[in-house]
Image (cartoon, rainbow, N blue to C red):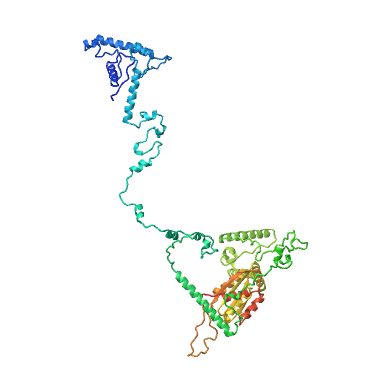
């Protein structure tokens, strides 16, 4: 098959068209075995046999004849179209349809059939060369839609993809192409394994009873149907620094507390007061709740809560306490709430204070000068001093300086006495001072009532007793001091300022370790008897808070050798709980 490039024949027969075009067309028809037109000279023509090489005039005549035929053929095939400026190119000669005019002009009437046969041969040859082109595949013309191309370019699938007519993978062909192993597989090994008997298979299969968890002898109905959780692996944790030291200190403190309780119990047994003291936590007990609350009693007929279920309540009766009226209680002012605090005075700097004093004195001086001008006050005498003597009394000082100096000294003495007398008149008397101090204490007490409870190891020293008693009376505090052989409890009540001062006295100012007394150094003591080390004396604040009312009317000392006496005394003043706090309070730094 000729694969060379072909050109379309010049239908219009231009003059500049060479003869080579005609020869190429004849060769084209020769290759496809199609008959050539009769007007082309052939070796069988008698005119060409005599003269092998045509003359120029013959060539011109042949060209003219060919041009005339082509013009006639173009006129026959040219459709009736409106005149346009664009040139219209007629189709090529091999694709012209068959018309009767061709026979008249000398064209072979079988030209169309031969051209169609040539096209079919070309398509068959192309299909043999590439069977995947849809335009050349003869099966497409047969109407088989199952093998049409699936892609956007309408190209058939490659045979290496192993697809069937429907476009899916052909498993049979694919399995035939897969490589087979040439060694023993798992299935071959399983064939060699011994078969399991029916009894063993039955034993291995779980029974239906085990599916029901209630049939398990270890089933606990309280646990419920809770799925077992997977145990989480514990992470490695380092022991924090000081952990076991803190545990040791806690154990030592607990052992010390137990030892202290044992010592207290032994001392109580020696004194014969087992029933009076209980050092355990059971000393403070609460009463059990009542069978019926007091607020429910008026509404129950039989005084039991069963009346609610039986419908025997006194709610809808006429004499019932529950009515549709709303009781608005009288508002009571809360304790310690004295309203908003008074406005604080403006704090001025030293410079501002001097400025205000200067302005105030200047106004007073102007007022005095106005009264002197009006004659209401006599004019002030000149303030003569020894430093300005010669400048004020010029002539008199020169005439008799001794007399003037004595006069000036008398005036200075008189002014000094007047000043001191004015100060004495402004000074408060002892009664006024006492009243003023008492008034401040009363104002302090009205602000709030603060209670402080102190625990002292030993208060037998008279100097310490005097300080505790006298300062409490001077500050207007109320309370009591309970002296017990084991320890001493000091309870004070008063205003915030007085309590603040008394706390400083008890916790800072008094040296509780000073146990020296008058005459102790001269007391005779046997030399062979060992001296007991003095106990460490200390004062601790075990509780501080605000209460509604005062529990004591004055400040008194009370000696209670037993705990029962102390409790009875404090019970009268509704302060028994202070003794419980003192009994349970233990200072880690002190061994009692």
From what the image shows, is residue 551 above or below residue 3? below
Q: Quadrant of residue 288?
A: bottom right
Q: Is residue 407 visible?
A: no
From what the image shows, is residue 211 above or below residue 467? above
Q: Position of residue 224 (x, y in %)?
A: 54, 61
Q: Nearer the viewer, residue 242 or 490?
A: 242
Disc tally is 0
Q: Nearer the viewer, residue 487 or 476?
A: 487
Q: Quadrant of residue 448?
A: bottom right
Q: Position of residue 553 (x, y in %)?
A: 67, 75
Q: Residue furthest front?
A: 198
Q: From the viewer's perspective, is 204 left or right of 117? A: right
Q: From the viewer's perspective, is 46 left or right of 70? A: left
From what the image shows, is residue 78 above or below residue 226? above
Q: Nearer the viewer, residue 495 or 427?
A: 495
Q: Nearer the viewer, residue 15 or 43?
A: 43
Tell me the residue at 73%/66% (across/down): 300
Q: Position of residue 233 (x, y in %)?
A: 44, 62
Q: Position of residue 572 (x, y in %)?
A: 67, 76
Q: Is residue 363 visible?
A: yes
Q: From the viewer's perspective, is 230 left or right of 404? A: left
Tell me the residue at 45%/70% (across/down): 244
* Quadrant showing the N terminus: top left
């Amino acid at each position: 098959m000729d694969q060379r490039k072909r050109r379309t024949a010049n239908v219009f027969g231009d003059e500049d068209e060479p003869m080579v075009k005609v020869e190429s067309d004849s060769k084209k028809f020769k290759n496809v075995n199609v008959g050539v037109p009769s007007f082309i000279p052939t070796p069988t023509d008698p005119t060409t046999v005599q003269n092998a090489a045509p003359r120029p005039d013959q060539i011109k005549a042949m060209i003219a004849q060919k041009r005339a035929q082509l013009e006639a053929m173009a006129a026959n095939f040219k459709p009736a179209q409106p005149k346009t400026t664009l040139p219209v190119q007629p189709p090529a000669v091999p694709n012209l349809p068959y018309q009767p005019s061709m026979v008249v002009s000398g064209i072979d009437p079988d030209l169309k059939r031969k051209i169609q046969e040539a096209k079919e041969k070309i398509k068959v040859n192309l299909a043999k060369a590439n069977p995947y082109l849809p335009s050349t595949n003869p099966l497409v013309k047969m109407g088989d839609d199952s093998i049409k191309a699936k892609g956007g370019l309408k190209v058939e699938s490659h045979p290496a993809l192993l697809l069937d007519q429907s476009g899916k993978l052909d498993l049979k062909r694919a399995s035939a192409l897969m490589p087979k192993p040439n060694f023993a597989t798992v299935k071959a090994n399983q064939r060699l394994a011994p078969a399991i008997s029916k009894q063993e298979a039955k034993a291995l299969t779980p029974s239906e009873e085990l599916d029901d968890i209630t049939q398990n002898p270890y089933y606990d109905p309280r646990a419920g149907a809770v799925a077992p959780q997977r145990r989480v692996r514990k992470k490695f944790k380092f022991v924090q620094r000081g952990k076991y030291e803190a545990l040791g200190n806690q154990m030592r403190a607990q052992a010390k507390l137990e030892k202290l309780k044992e010592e207290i119990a032994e001392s109580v047994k020696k004194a014969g007061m087992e029933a009076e003291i209980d050092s355990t936590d059971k000393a403070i007990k609460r009463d059990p709740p009542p069978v019926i609350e007091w607020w429910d009693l008026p509404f129950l007929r039989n005084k039991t809560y069963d009346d609610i279920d039986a419908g025997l309540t006194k709610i809808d009766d006429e004499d019932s306490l529950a009515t549709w009226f709303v009781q608005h209680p009288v508002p009571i002012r809360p304790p310690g709430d004295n309203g908003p605090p008074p406005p604080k005075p403006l704090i001025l700097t030293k410079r501002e204070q001097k400025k205000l004093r200067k302005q105030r004195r200047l106004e007073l001086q102007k007022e005095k000068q106005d009264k002197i001008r009006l004659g209401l006050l006599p004019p002030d005498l000149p303030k003569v001093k020894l430093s300005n003597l010669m400048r004020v009394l010029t002539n008199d000082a020169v005439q008799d300086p001794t007399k003037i100096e004595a006069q000036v000294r008398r005036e200075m003495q008189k002014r000094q006495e007047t000043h001191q007398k004015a100060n004495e008149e402004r000074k408060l008397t002892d009664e006024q001072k006492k009243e003023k101090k008492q008034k401040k204490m009363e104002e302090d007490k009205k602000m709030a009532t603060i209670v402080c409870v102190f625990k002292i190891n030993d208060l037998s020293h008279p100097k310490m007793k005097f300080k505790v008693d006298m300062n409490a009376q001077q500050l207007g505090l109320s309370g009591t001091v309970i002296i017990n052989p084991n320890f001493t409890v000091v309870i004070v009540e008063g205003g915030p300022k007085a309590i603040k001062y008394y706390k400083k006295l008890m916790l800072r100012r008094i040296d509780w370790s000073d146990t020296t007394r008058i005459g102790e150094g001269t007391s005779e003591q046997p030399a062979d008897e060992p001296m007991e080390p003095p106990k460490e004396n200390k004062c601790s604040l075990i509780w501080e808070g605000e209460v509604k009312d005062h529990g004591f009317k004055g400040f008194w000392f009370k000696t209670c050798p037993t705990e029962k006496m102390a409790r009875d005394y404090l019970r009268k003043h509704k302060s028994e709980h202070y003794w419980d706090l003192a009994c349970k309070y233990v200072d880690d730094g002190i061994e009692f």
